[in-house]
Image: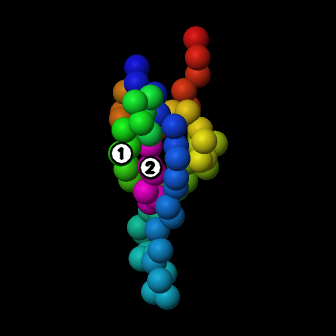
């Protein structure tokens, strides 16, 4: 299972208009793998808080392709 480090989280900027009603807040999450390769994924802001994921967290993707904390076995 491939693991990544969250190196940066950018919260969406909705400007003075604010977020549209009913639209979930999404963040851009910058991931870096063990080889130093980076990718950016869009992730629900609520999910990051619920799973206690922040910059510096080690993560992997679960079976639903959502970020989850990585724990050594």
Q: Quadrant of residue 57?
A: top right
Q: Please name whichever residue, 61 or 30, is drawn nearer the observer in this view of the structure.
A: 30
> Are circles 1 and 2 on residues that touch, CB within 8 Å?
yes
Left or right: residue 30 versus residue 50 is left
Q: Residue 50's x, y, as percent?
A: 60, 45
Q: Residues within 10 Å of mark 1 (few under 14, many from 20)?
A: few
- Display coloring: rainbow
Q: For the view shown, which residue lies furthest in the top direction? A: 73
Q: Which residue is mark 1?
A: 39
SS category of the residue bearing label 1? strand
Q: Which residue is mark 2?
A: 30
**Number of the label disc, if any, that sits on residue 6:** none
21 lies above or below 32: below
**Lower sequence index among marks 1 and 2:** 2
Q: Residues within 10 Å of mark 2 (few under 14, many from 20)?
A: some
67 lies above or below 10: above
Q: Main secondary structure of the magenta part?
A: strand
Q: Residue at x 38, y 43 (%)?
A: 38
Q: Please name whichever residue, 34 or 47, is drawn nearer the observer in this view of the structure.
A: 34
Q: Residue 48's x, y, as percent?
A: 55, 48
Q: Which residues are magenta?
A: 26-31
Q: Residue at x 60, y 47 (%)?
A: 54
């Amino acid at each position: 299972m491939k693991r990544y480090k969250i190196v940066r989280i950018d919260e969406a900027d909705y400007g003075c208009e604010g977020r549209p009603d009913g639209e979930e807040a999404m963040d851009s999450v910058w991931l870096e793998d063990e080889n130093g390769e980076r990718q950016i994924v869009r992730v629900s802001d609520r999910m990051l808080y619920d799973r206690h994921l922040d910059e510096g967290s080690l993560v992997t993707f679960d079976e639903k392709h959502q970020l989850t904390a990585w724990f050594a076995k």
